[in-house]
Amino acid sequence: MSPADLDRLIARAEHVLARFEATLPPAPPEPDWKAHAHRWRTRNGRGWLEPIHKLQGIRPADLQDVDAQKARIDANTRQFIEGRRANNVLLTGARGTGKSSLIRAMLTEYAPRGLRVIEVDKSDLIDLAHIVDLVTTRSERFIIFCDDLSFDEGEPGYKALKSVLDGSFAAVPDNVLIYATSNRRHLLPEYFDENARTKYVGDEIHPAEVVEEKISLSERFGLWVSFYPFSQDEYLSIVQHWLREFGVALTDWETLRQESLQWSLMRGSRSGRVAWQFARDCAGRLGDA
């Protein structure tokens, strides 16, 4: 091959390579480590940490009538940011009782001391190992937050989460914990006929293998914290708290009390979320008056 032919071949190869590179998605942006919270985003097979600069400014004091749960989460989080041993946490129970809000409150409380939160959707849990690799050398302490977590059988994120929690030969770095919320204690749907497969050997109960599998994921969380529906009095105390926070005077409390109870009846729930929503509506109406 002559030098001229070789030059033409190289030029053609470079042209083809340039066209191919033009079709590739852009490289993901570098993480903004100044942000206190991130979301894990994916596109075209690539993932990156998207900073969240506008955060919900909820404080631990804003969460009413969950003092026991708040104390356990606070103690575990404080141990974590101080470099002491701490557990992955599963928060389960009734909707709207403050599970995810409590994690946001921990970020508000401890972000000045180096706490950071990375929010990961269930569909992106297969990237957990990559996310851990991104933060393993950082000095901050990272909570990987999975909200409203539940799985159907066979979903790939299930095994990825299981592995990162406590099922891989590779150790998870000391600056990473997983906090997850769920309405299901065992994170997977449970069926009546599964209990029928349970065996009795002497006086011992041996759960069916499918039951064992469903329990095994939740057992990998070292700390379980349960939340329960609020009583009417607890609901009303939360309403009062948020009305004060939104600047609504309680001089006509009896009227506001009746309105808040009617609001909860229409929503079919006496939760902290419903109380907050009523207070926002009330503050908006009275503010416009």
Image: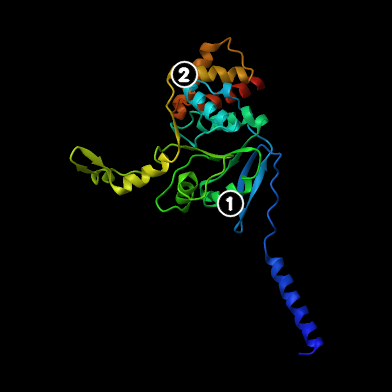
Q: Position of residue 65 (x, y in %)?
A: 49, 20
Instruction: Point out residue 143 in the picture as x, y percentages from the top left corner.
Output: 57, 38
| For residue 285, above or below residue 34 | above
Residue occupying the far right of the picture: 4
Place of residue 225 in the rendered image (x, y in percent of width and height, measured from the top left): 45, 30
- Given residues 156 and 191, the one toward you in this image is 156
Q: Residue 130: which disc?
A: 1
Q: Which residue is mark 2?
A: 234
Q: Is residue 227 left or right of residue 48?
A: left
Quarter of the view holding residue 1? bottom right
Q: Quadrant of the C terminus?
A: top right
Relative to 215, 19 lies left or right = right
Q: Position of residue 31 (x, y in %)?
A: 69, 46
For this rendering, which residue is in front, 13 or 132?
A: 132
Q: Residue at x 53, y 20 (%)?
A: 239
Residue with the most extreme top position: 251
Residues packed near mark 2 inside 10 Å, few (<14), some (14 to 19) or many (20 plus): some
Mark 1 and mark 2 lie on one chain; the one further toward the N terminus is: 1
Q: Against 68, is 29 above or below?
A: below
Using the numbered discs, state the Cα–Cα distance from disc 1 to disc 2 in whole angstroms.
Answer: 42 Å
Q: Residues within 10 Å of mark 1 (few under 14, many from 20)?
A: few
User: Label 2 sits on what residue type?
Assistant: Glu
Q: Amino acid at mark 1?
A: His
Query: What secondary structure is found at the residue carrying circle 1?
Result: helix
| Number of marks in the rendered image | 2
Could you tell me which residue is drawn at 58 percent across and 29 percent down? 106
> From this viewpoint, which residue is outermost toward the left?
202
Q: Name the secondary structure under disc 2.
A: helix
